[in-house]
Structure formats: C-alpha cells, structure tokens
Image (spheres, rainbow, N blue to C red):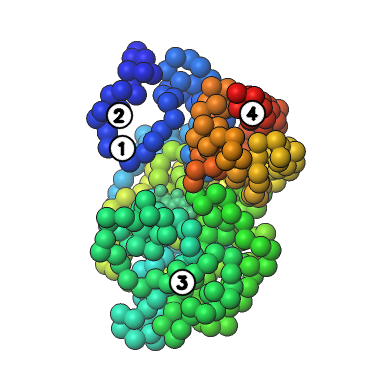
C-alpha cells in the first residue's frame, strides 16, 4: 500500500485545494477510533462535523445499509419504494411535524427551506411578488451554494462568487432587538442555527430562541432552525431547540441523519407550510432514495429511545467540567452544549491549527475553525475513559506548547 506521504502528495497535486486537511490518511474506522494507512490509531473528536454522532460503522446502521444495498438502492421519486413511508412518518414523529421533504446534502435542505418559506410567503402570507425577505444571522454557516453564500458574512466563503442572490437581511446573532428592527411586511422567515457550529460553537443567551419563537409567531414569520449540526442527539437533546422547549416551524436536518454512511438531509414542517409545494416545483433525483431512507430509518429508530441523547448529556458534563479546568492554562474560553465544545486557544500560545497538529501527533483528531478555536465533538458512542484521555492529551499539548 502507498504511504501516507505519497497519498497526500497525489491528493494535493490532483485535487482542488478547497480544503486544508490535517496530514493524516485514514484507512479504517470503528466506533470512535480511526486507523491510518500506517496502522496508527486516533480518537476521532470531530466525528465528521457531527455526521458521525453514532460512531463509525455502527452495527445497526451498517446492517440496515447492507440489507438495503442487496435489495434496492434507487428508484427516483417517479415511483414509491418500501422505505419511504417509514422514513417520512418516523422523521415526522421525531420532529413532531406532519410532513417531510427529503434531500441529500445539508445545503440542499437549507435551499429547500428558503424556497418553501418564499412560496409560503407569497401564497399564504400574501407578500407582494418577488419581494420576500428572510432574516439571517451574522457568522452563519448554512452551506456552500451560490444563494447560501450570498448571505454569508465570511469573506472567504463569498469573495469573487457574486453576483449574489438578493432577499436576505443579515442581523447580529443573539440579538432579538436586531431581528425586530429588520422585520417588515415582506419578511417571511427567520433562519437561525440554535447553536452556531462553524462560527466556533456559539451558544446564544438563554431565552434567545424562545424570543425568536415568540417574535415569529407574533409577526407571522416562519422560524426555520438549521439543526444540521446541532440536532440529532449532539447537545443532549434530540434538537438544540429542545433546551428552551422551542419548536420551530421548519427543522432543517442533515449530517447525522445519514448515519455516517450516505448523505441524507430533509426539512420537516406542518402541512400549512410544506403543503405549498406541488409536483414539479422542487425535488432531487437522489433525495429520499431507498438506501438513504433505510439508513435514515435506522438513525431515527436509534434516536427514538433517547439513549443517545442521554449519553451525550452525561458525557457532555464530563467534557465541559474538564475543559473548564483548562481555562487559564492555554485556553481562554470554552463554549458548547452536550458533547460539543468550542475551545478558544490563547492566541499568545498557538493557533487552532497548531493545537490540532499537536493533538494529531498525540493520536487525537480535531479541527480548528476561525483561527484560534478548536472544536470537540466526538461520536456519542465514545467511552468516558477515552474522552477523559483525549482531554488529558489536550492539556498536555497545551502545557508542551507553553514550555516550548
Ligand atoms: C454542515 C452544515 C450545513 C451544510 O451541510 P452540507 O451537507 O455540507 O451541505 C448547513 N448548515 C449547518 C448548520 C451545517 O453545520
């Protein structure tokens, strides 16, 4: 087999440089542990940005996928297939919503929510043609399509990709006053991440999501919660909105919905909203395919017991208690909820990337975001001992950087 160095060299030479990966070439993975091509093992503390909430190769998910692979993989939505009803009913029950519109990637689900909100605005709310606006947050991350990056505030994500799609108003994340000031008669929706993942795991103040909910209800706006990264067990609840008992009008889901096997995304909403979509108006060749639904069904079943949510809450206590002890020892601030943490490294000490590399050398996989932040989001199946060990590696790495 080729060495890591050889594979990295070819990868860098023959692929577009739209990512800046850490220098590790993964060959195999089970649960929370991955193995590189040289046989070295690492604890995965990124979990595919929460796509691997149930770990690598979870037996129930793999079994469902294998059974489906051998029987039926694709029909297109021109026909029904035998996994579709259970997927829509199951995800509808999990979200408490009437209807599901399945897609593949997260960005497609966000696009779906935008289109549904606009159509709802014109057909139900009575907004003047082509005048709908949607309120979005600064620091948002909703994906990479041309429309979505049109309302990004990250220059890297936007620059030289114009002209941009109009119809979005960007306000400060966490400020209910800012939303109030931006609403007008043509506003159809507020699109919000209950916790901003890419921005560095930013948790808004308690009460913010409830206030957004109340404002949306009062002004006749759809509250769209992008739970692609925050949802499906990660924060210790099924959805991050659950922490405030908030029910959005539209859930946007992805990442872990595909069980770490295939891309599966969806939006969930009630009939008065999602009912505006008629045949031919939106879709996807692969959206809701049999393999995706079979995997999604396994994920939904696993979440229906509450066992993963409880485990994320319990391990999250351990994670946050131990991380807080490191504040002042190379760490400036720790944020997050459940088994999910954004850790700001003291910029005097090192960049997020330097810490990520130091952890890689210590057999822990993490990824930096926005310069000085690293994100910890191990699979929920991680053992408590392994989690504590990984935090110990972080402490040691910071200590070592300090003494360099
Ligand atoms: C990852 C992510 C997306 C985009 O999902 P893709 O599958 O990469 O298109 C959208 N919103 C949030 C909050 C995400 O974390």
Q: Note whether ligand 1 is within 8 Å of mark 3.
A: no
The label shown at residue 12 is 2
- Please provide percent x and percent y for residue 224: 50, 67
The label shown at residue 402 is 4
**Quarter location, residue 10:** top left
**Mark 2 vs mark 3: which is more N-terminal?**
2
Looking at the image, can residue 117 be seen? no
Looking at the image, can residue 29 be seen? yes
> Could you tell me which quadrant the N terminus lies in?
top left
Give me the residue at 51% from left, 31% from top: 354
Answer with left or right where residue 259 lies relative to residue 319: left
Mark 3 and mark 4 in contact? Answer it, CB < 8 Å. no
**Mark 2 vs mark 1: which is more N-terminal?**
2
- Please provide percent x and percent y for residue 94: 57, 57
Of badges 3 and 4, nearer the viewer stands 4
Circle 1 residue: 17
Q: Nearer the viewer, residue 346 or 281?
A: 346
User: Where is 111 relative to 259, above or below?
Assistant: below
- Please provide percent x and percent y for residue 78: 27, 57
User: Which secondary structure, mark 2?
Assistant: helix
User: Which secondary structure, mark 4?
Assistant: helix
**Quarter location, residue 282:** bottom left
Give me the residue at 48% from left, 58% from top: 139
């Amino acid at each position: 087999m080729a060495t890591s160095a050889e594979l990295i060299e070819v990868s860098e030479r023959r692929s577009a440089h739209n990512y800046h990966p850490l220098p590790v070439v993964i060959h195999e993975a089970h649960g929370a542990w991955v193995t590189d091509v040289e046989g070295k093992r690492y604890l995965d503390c990124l979990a595919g940005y929460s796509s691997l909430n149930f770990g690598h190769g979870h037996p129930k998910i793999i079994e469902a996928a294998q059974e489906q692979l051998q029987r039926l993989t694709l029909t297109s939505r021109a026909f029904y297939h035998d996994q579709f009803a259970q997927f829509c009913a199951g995800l509808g029950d999990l979200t408490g919503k009437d209807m599901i519109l399945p897609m593949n990637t997260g960005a497609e689900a966000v696009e779906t929510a935008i289109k549904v909100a606009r159509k709802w605005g014109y057909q139900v709310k009575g907004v003047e043609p082509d005048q709908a606006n949607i309120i979005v947050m600064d620091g948002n991350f909703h994906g990479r399509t041309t429309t979505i990056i049109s309302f990004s505030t990250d220059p890297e994500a936007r620059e030289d990709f114009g002209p941009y799609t109009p119809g979005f108003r960007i306000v400060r994340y966490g400020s209910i006053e800012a939303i109030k000031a931006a609403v007008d008669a043509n506003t159809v929706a507020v699109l919000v991440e209950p916790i901003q993942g890419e921005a560095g795991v930013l948790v808004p103040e308690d009460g913010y999501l409830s206030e957004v909910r109340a404002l949306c209800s009062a002004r006749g706006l759809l509250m769209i919660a992008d739970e692609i990264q925050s949802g499906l067990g990660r924060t210790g609840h099924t959805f991050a909105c659950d922490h405030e008992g908030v029910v959005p009008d539209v859930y946007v889901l992805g990442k872990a919905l595909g069980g770490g096997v295939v891309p599966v995304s969806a939006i969930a909403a009630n009939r008065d909203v999602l009912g505006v979509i008629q045949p031919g108006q939106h879709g996807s060749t692969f959206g809701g395919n049999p393999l995706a639904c079979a995997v999604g069904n396994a994920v939904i079943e696993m979440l229906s017991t509450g066992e993963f949510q409880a485990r994320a809450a319990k391990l999250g206590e351990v994670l946050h208690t131990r991380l807080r002890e490191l504040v002042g020892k190379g760490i400036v601030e720790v944020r997050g909820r459940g088994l999910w943490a954004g850790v700001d490294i003291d910029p005097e000490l090192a960049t997020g990337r330097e810490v990520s590399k130091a952890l890689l050398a210590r057999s822990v996989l993490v990824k930096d975001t926005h310069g000085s932040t690293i994100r910890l989001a191990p699979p929920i199946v991680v053992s408590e001992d392994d989690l504590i060990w990984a935090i110990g590696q972080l402490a040691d790495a910071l200590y070592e950087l300090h003494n360099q």
